[in-house]
Image: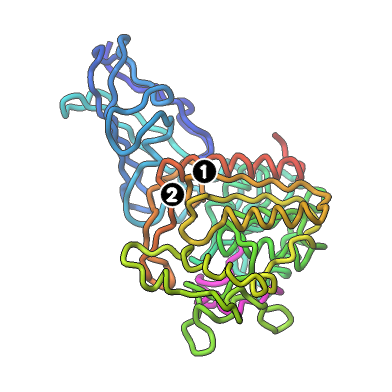
Amino acid sequence: MPAAFSISPAVDLIDVPRRIVLTGLPAGAEVTVAAETPRGGRPWRAQAVFAADAAGTVDLGRDAPLRGDYEGVAAMGLVCAQDGEGELFHADMAQPLETTLTALIGGEPVASGGFSQILMTEGVTRHPLAEDELVGTLFLPAGEGPHPAIMILNGSGGGINEPRAALWASRGVAALALGYFGAPGLPRYISNTPLEYFARGIDWLRARVRPKNDFVAVAGQSRGGELALLLGATFPDKVSAVLGYVPSAFVHGGQAAADPAPGLGRDGPCWTLDGRPLVHQWQDNATASWKPYDEATDTRRNADAMRTALGDPAAMARARIPVERIAGPVLLVSGGDDGAWPSDLYSLIVQSSLLAAGHPHEVLWKNWPAAGHSILFPYTPATRIAHRHPVSGIATTMGGTPAANAEANAGAWEAALAFVRRHGGTAG
């Protein structure tokens, strides 16, 4: 019997893990399994070497590789370990990610197979938004609805997070990926971003989709996680639930995405309300210092500078987000090796503040101790740890390991999906 791949499911949404089994091999043979996925026109690749069992079988959900680009048992390890250049997704959300698997013995191919990861199921529709000075993309689920709704916010890299919104819509949630800087028609920098802009975005989304149970959640990552908590606390009548990926418990200044103009910069304001900048944790802070970041001789960790600010409790109290004003459930996702800022500590502070205030809604905190800041998307490459910031251009590390970040990527999405289903009323 010739060697062959069995892959199940061969075609499905990107958040579905695959069972990948290779049969028909010589018993005990060492076989290299290589995975290649074109992403935005560029190939991303990973490979690992396995030993066939006595029946001539390799099961990626059972077997750890002998050596290669990942360690341990991981059914989707060859995807999560891929490395490459450019974007993780195609520009067209309707275009599946096609992964080709090749098995080689002694350098000679003995079997090939493949599978497709989909972001948009049939019937999901994409609607660009450019009105009322709002810029973003709305993805609507198949079927008439009504559907719960969610607004997706990126972090300090800016732009519009269409992949996450497309996947939410495929899971039955109307999703608006709202840009606020770093995209056509928007400011280049994060400095002096008015919170009223997001209130208008929530109002637009609610009026446009008339969501099920009037449910509109706000979800953001990094600076977007800080923003999601801030919006829930500032506009509690508009925000039904908050999902904070690697968030902050405090208002921060412009930091790496700041306008470098005089009076702004990384120590200048980021958010405004009623035309006035919000107090942030670097203001009048007696201990805050950029030295651990600026003078680092190895790869820089922004978190090292952020921790210096914690030495001035009065300054931090002034900048604390009053999360007890949030009028709905809260999900927090963090990594214990976060290189951008201590999102685990920040999440603990948020959780503690809510519980101390007798918050009447669910407060769920999911932490992965070995993961970093890049807790992003299920079953995609998790190898981008050190990188140049897309706005400042400074090389920095986000922390974690590819394996830990991949585990957090899958676990965080599972938690987020279940959270919104519980509170927004989507189908299971």
Label 1 residue SS: helix
Quadrant of the image occupied by residue 133: bottom right
Q: Nearer the viewer, mark 2 or mark 1?
A: 2
Give the x, y percent position of residue 184. Answer: 51, 72
Residue 287 visible in this rendered orientation of the protein: yes
Range drawn in magenta: 177-196
Q: Contact (CB < 8 A) between labels 2 and 1? A: yes
Give 200 or 281, whichever is nearer the viewer. Answer: 281
**Magenta part, dominant SS:** loop
Question: Which quarter of the image is occupied by the N terminus?
Answer: top left
Q: Residue 109: give its label.
A: none
Instruction: Please indicate whether residue 147 sits to the left or right of residue 66 in the image.
Output: right
With 205 as the anchor, is 120 left or right in this view?
left
| Circle 2 residue | 400
Labels 2 and 1: the sequence-earlier one: 2
Q: Residue at x 58, y 69 (%)?
A: 311
Q: Position of residue 142 (x, y in %)?
A: 66, 44
